[in-house]
Amino acid sequence: MIEIAYWAFALIATAVYAVVRFLIYLKKRKIEVGHELICFGFFAYILLLARVVCFPWHSLDGRAVRAVIDPDLMFPPNINLKPFTFVNDFYPGWFINVFGNIILFIPVGIFFPWLTKRINSFAKTVLAGFGFTMIIETLQLFLYDRCSDVDDLILNTLGATIGAGIYFLGRKAFSQRKQK
């Protein structure tokens, strides 16, 4: 069994982020403050996202929140492959789950095209959002107290789609305004 505390994950991720950004600086020999702020915003978003999707919301026996990887508890995997179960399954907190999954992934649709030159269209952004969500849902298969859910895949991709719409409409409006 492997237990990973969120604070340890965040500390290691922050150290890795700092080293990577420093190595990029050494290669380019310049810092673009605006770009660095966007990169840091994306990093902070990833830390928040990891907290929400990989770590339980409750403490166990007063201990810090931990993600647990335990092969004995992984099988059978906790997975839902039936689409739109949230339509019929009104459990306490369903509203937060549905709209939280959408809202939480809007930044994916904004950050991906903003940070990479390869994701330069609405369709590529939506596809990248789908792929990113698929990675997260696959990762959750290894965390016994998390559930991989096709509804999350649908709702998260919808959130990335909304974010892509915001980004590309905003970019178009900005470029038209700049031309005037």
Image (cartoon, rainbow, N blue to C red):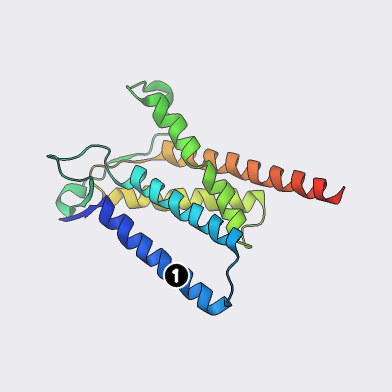
Q: Position of residue 49 (x, y in %)?
A: 40, 46
Q: Position of residue 77 (x, y in %)?
A: 26, 45
- Left or right side of 41 for 110: right
Residue nearest the observer in this picture, 93 or 123:
93
Occupied quadrant, residue 79:
top left
Q: What residue is drawn where x is 46% and y is 40%?
A: 104
Q: What residue is drawn where x is 29% and y is 56%?
A: 9
- Left or right side of 164 for 141: left
Local packing at callout 1 (Cα closer than 10 Å; few below 14, some 14-19, many 20+) is few
Residue nearest the observer in this picture, 129 or 174:
174
User: Which residue was labeled with disc 1?
Assistant: 20
Is residue 155 among the parts visible in the rendering? Answer: no
Find the residue positioned furthest to the left.
61
Q: Position of residue 121 (x, y in %)?
A: 67, 53
Residue nearest the observer in this picture, 110 or 153:
110
Find the residue positioned furthest to the right.
180
Q: Position of residue 163 (x, y in %)?
A: 58, 42
- The quarter of the image holding the N terminus is bottom left
Mark 1 residue type = Val
